Amino acid sequence: MSILLQHLLHEENRCAIFSRAMQQSSKISDRQEKEFASAIRIDGVEIRLVRLSLVEPFETSFGKIDSRLVFLVSVNAAGIRGWGEVVAGEEPLYSYETVGTALHVIKNFLAPTLLNDPLTSHDDLAQRFAPFRGHNMAKAGLELAFMDLLAKLTGQSLAALVNGERKRIAVGVSLGIQPTIAELLKRVDLYLGLGYQRIKLKIKPGWDVDIVAAVRRLYPEILLSVDANSAYTLADAEHLRKLDDFELLMIEQPLHNDDLLDHAKLQKLLKTRLCLDESIVGQRQAKAALDLESCRIINIKIGRVGGYSEALAIHDLCFARGIPVWCGGMLESGIGRAHNIALASLPGFTLPGDISASARYFARDLISPEVTVAEDGTVAVPDAVGLGFDVDLPFIESRTETRIYLSRE
Ligand code: OSB
Ligand code: MG
């Protein structure tokens, strides 16, 4: 074992590196009492693009996919490997980022900043990424890998590293647009039977009020929400007001991704709470949205906001203002999902997340054991070190379409 690792794993040093007493702190570095005694020297960054078929197509207002090109990033130091995932899609539909843009940005800009000089802290990593504008999903992928590495080097779970508290998290399922209402009802019935605590229906013009009415008629009591992925404009306000009749938990991202002002106008016209997803790309947008009253709930996705530090800052801001948050999903593989589970263990995550069982997405996941949802609609937060799941390398290898290894010059 290297001297660095021996040092980091020593119980006293571990406690010195991260103080768990500092709850409510927005920065990971504030949870850290001092810089690492020895800096972390990253030996290499590996990128793998892995094709996984979805168990069934997933359709939203912006498109339909039947597989994911999963973008895995791993970093290694002192013989230990940390894993992250870039959640970007193959086309710039949910956001401008794609697998291609993330590959370009990581390879040419982000990874070189980590490989050149040893890292002294999480803050150090954030400072190296800060000059680069946007590309949050690319930044997050690398940051997640670094966080898993950090958790492993310091002998703790990811949830412990971010001061997560919950042992189990409540989860829901996001149901795509279906060919018929009958097909949708079949899926609602299936997932409620499996225990899921909340059903989210993807909507778009022509697939909205009627389907919500049909689901509500059969299930008057369930937690039910809708997600429009920016399919409407303020001119649709009267139509969207019809959704007020169905006691929805929230309406997620009805309007354009960068329009906080129109969301604020719409929120004033509706009884149902609005939740923002696409609009919240960082803590400044979160603060602006709350100040403007553009929404009353926020969906936090680590990828969309650029990593854990930004996700934690949004969590802390919402927690302080009594705004509920929940953890969104991007049809991640188990590796991205493991990070979502750690994040959702924080106390402000009071609504069920889009963190479904591995089997809801893929015939076989990249981790073992796979993520499972208990009958009570909860997922266990692992307490093993790092991700808390084993990464299934042989299976990843068998599905890898592209592999790129970046090392020090
Ligand atoms: O808007 O929340 C969304 C999937 C891909 C892109 C955007 C979204 C979604 C989902 C699925 O709703 C959430 C999941 O189960 O991963
Ligand atoms: Mg959404």
Image (cartoon, rainbow, N blue to C red):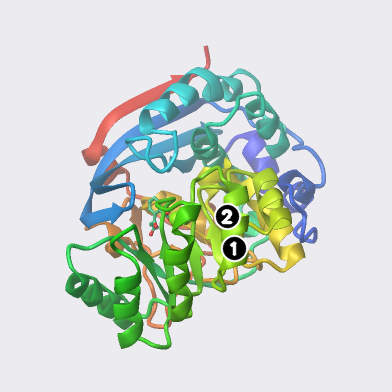
Label 2, on which residue?
263
304 relative to 129 in the view: left or right: left
Q: What residue is shown at x 37% (from left), y 40% (from top)?
A: 93
Callout 2, which amino acid?
A: His
244 relative to 375 in the view: left or right: right
Depth check: give the residue in front, 356 or 401: 356
Q: Position of residue 210 (x, y in %)?
A: 30, 73
Q: Confirm or deny contact between disc 2 and disc 1 (CB under 8 A).
A: yes
Q: Is residue 370 above or below residue 405?
A: below
Q: Is residue 312 above or below residue 202?
A: above
Q: Position of residue 28 (x, y in %)?
A: 71, 47
Q: Quadrant of the N terminus?
A: top right
Q: What residue is shown at x 66% (from left), y 26% (from top)?
A: 128
Q: Position of residue 176 (x, y in %)?
A: 29, 60
Callout 1, which amino acid?
A: Gln
Q: Is residue 121 visible?
A: no
How would you rate the neighbour count of disc 2 (Cα within 10 Å): few for under 14, some for 14-19, many for 20 or more? many
Label 1, on which residue?
267
Q: Quadrant of ligand 2?
A: bottom left
Depth check: give the residue in front, 5 or 23: 23
